[in-house]
Amino acid sequence: MKLTEKRLRQIIKQELKESYAEDVKIYHKEMAEAQKGWDARATDLNEREQTMNSVGRVQRSIKAVLEGFKKMPVSEALGTVSKGHANKFVKAMGMLESILEDTSGWLKENQ
């Protein structure tokens, strides 16, 4: 069989097309794998952002409650009813302040 210039050009074009098609398939496969990684990373970041927003909302709510109770004479009012209630209230306020400090530190560390 004689290899003519025309036939040689056809063979080269066919090989280039096949090679290009294979390269495109490989590229698409690699891009799909990379996209999965980016999607997983985006999901992780979204979850972290939601957690931080939730902690921030809780922190603001606790802060508002503490500020509201500090403005009122709640301990004195509870003390007139029962000294034990007043002590429990003071402990609860201390616990809320502790939670507020802990969440403030956590938010600063994770931002």
Image: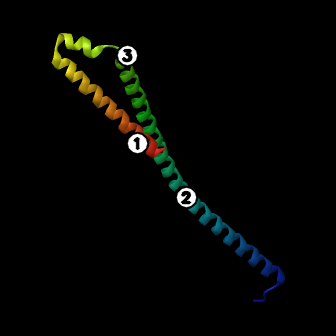
The residue at the point 63 percent across, 69 percent down is 22
In the image, residue 38 sits, relative to residue 10, either above or below, namely above
Q: Is residue 50 left or right of residue 14?
A: left
Tag 1's secondary structure?
helix
- In the picture of the structure, the residue carrying the numbered disc 3 is 71
Q: Is residue 102 left or right of residue 32?
A: left
Amino acid carrying label 1: it is Trp
Residue denoted by label 2: 34
Q: Where is residue 63 shown, x and y percent of the image? A: 40, 26
Give the residue type that dot 2 points to. Ala
Dot 3 falls on a residue whose secondary structure is helix
- Residue 57 is drawn in which quadrant? top left
88 or 107, which lies in front? 88
Cα distance between the residues tagged 3 and 2: 55 Å
Dot 3: few (<14), some (14–19), or many (≥20) neighbours within 10 Å? few
Q: Tell which tag, 1 or 3, sits nearer the viewer.
A: 3
Q: Residue furthest right?
A: 5
